[in-house]
């Protein structure tokens, strides 16, 4: 059982406090920033900009259908979550192609169409900063905490964080392709800790997926909190960056 009370936590002001944490690692998509629209809706807009017809509702349904069967491929479960930068690009382009084909788009296999959709996600055009994230990063940086963004997604997100104005607060931005492993591999977390030069117990990991960002992080010795903006707060989850700041005593 991986409890929240194992390392550096004391009760105060009605919430748990992380007294020994010296660094915070934050997931990117779904945590620091979110999509402005559903993935299928974004594909529809991008295709329309190229003069290509598509059905938004069909694309949204295709995204859901394809992802349910594609998730293990994305994580590379069969090879123990190993990855490279090259594989990350290939797997996302494959996902785009599968979605277009599932939506019965005749141009779904066109490499130029796939590449244009893939590349469009390397900007802030379809992303927004999560409410309170910038202020949290500013306060945490002023308090002297080391802040790192780490993602299972590929390096396109580095451009996004730059354009959203978040990278000045971050000492490092790390992707699965940099590490050679994807969450939930313990090597993803162990390599981050080694890269930071810190003991895992000094690091709080924050992300929006309980399996990948919380359970896996705790197994690797990290402290971990679920970011659940639509959920209820608890000792293992926060619904806002304000609450996360309270946990850290900011």
Image (cartoon, helix red, strand yellow):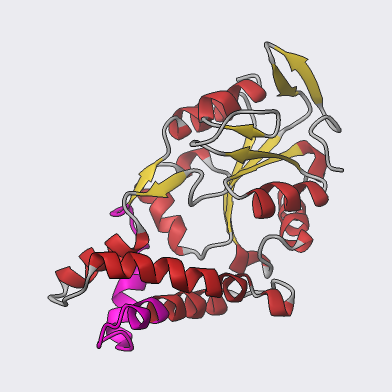
Specify whether residue 245 is in view: yes
Q: Residue at x 73, y 55 (%)?
A: 189
Relative height, residue 199 to residue 152 (above, below): above
Q: Nearer the viewer, residue 204 or 98?
A: 98
Q: Quadrant of the C terminus?
A: top right
* Residue 235 magenta: no
- In the rendering, at what x and y percent does residue 222 appear? 77, 44
Q: Residue at x 51, y 65 (%)?
A: 154
Residue 112 in the figure: left or right of residue 87: left
Q: Relative to the observer, which residue lies in front, 169 or 25?
A: 25
Residue 58 appears left or right of 226: left
In the rendered picture of this protein, how many numbered marks are placed on residues? 0
Quick one: 167 or 149, which is closer to the camera?
Answer: 149
Q: Would residue 239 be found to the left or right of residue 51 on screen?
A: right
What residue range appears in magenta?
98-126
Instruction: Find the residue positioned furthest to the top.
Output: 13
Tell me if residue 104 comes above or below residue 165 in the rendering.
below
Can you tell which quarter of the image residue 48 is in? bottom left
Q: Position of residue 98 (x, y in %)?
A: 41, 81
- Please indicate whether residue 198 sits to the left or right of residue 113 in the image: right
**At x 57% / y 39%, what residue is drawn?**
227
Which x, y percent locates residue 82?
69, 74
Q: Quadrant of the N terminus?
A: top right
Rendered residue at 74%/49% (across/down): 215
Residue 138 location, x and y as percent?
50, 29
Vertical placement of residue 246 versus 127, above or below: above
Which residue is at the front of the view, 92 or 53? 53
Magenta stretch holds residue 111: yes
Task: Evaluate whether residue 120 shows in this view.
Answer: no
Specify the farthest residue to the left. 51
């Amino acid at each position: 059982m991986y409890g929240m009370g194992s390392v550096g936590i004391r009760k105060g002001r009605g919430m748990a406090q992380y007294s020994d944490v010296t660094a915070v690692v934050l997931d990117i998509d779904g945590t620091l920033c979110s999509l402005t629209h559903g993935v299928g809706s974004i594909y529809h807009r991008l295709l329309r900009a190229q003069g290509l017809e598509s059905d938004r509702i069909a694309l949204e349904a295709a995204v859901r259908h394809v992802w349910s069967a594609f998730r293990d491929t994305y994580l590379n479960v069969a090879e123990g979550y190993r990855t490279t930068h090259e594989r990350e690009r290939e797997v996302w382009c494959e996902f785009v192609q599968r979605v277009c084909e599932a939506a019965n788009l005749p141009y779904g296999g066109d490499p130029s169409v796939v590449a244009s959709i893939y590349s469009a996600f390397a900007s802030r055009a379809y992303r927004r900063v999560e409410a309170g994230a910038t202020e949290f990063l500013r306060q945490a940086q002023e308090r002297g905490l080391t802040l790192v963004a780490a993602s299972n997604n590929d390096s396109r997100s580095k451009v996004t964080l730059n354009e959203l104005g978040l990278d000045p607060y971050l000492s490092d931005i790390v992707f699965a392709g940099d590490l050679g492993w994807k969450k939930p591999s313990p090597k993803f977390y162990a390599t981050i800790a080694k890269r930071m030069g810190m003991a895992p117990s000094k690091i709080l990991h924050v992300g929006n997926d309980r399996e990948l960002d919380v359970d896996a992080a705790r197994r690797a010795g990290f402290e971990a909190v679920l970011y659940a903006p639509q959920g209820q707060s608890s000792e293992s989850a926060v619904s806002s960056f304000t609450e996360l700041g309270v946990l850290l005593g900011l």
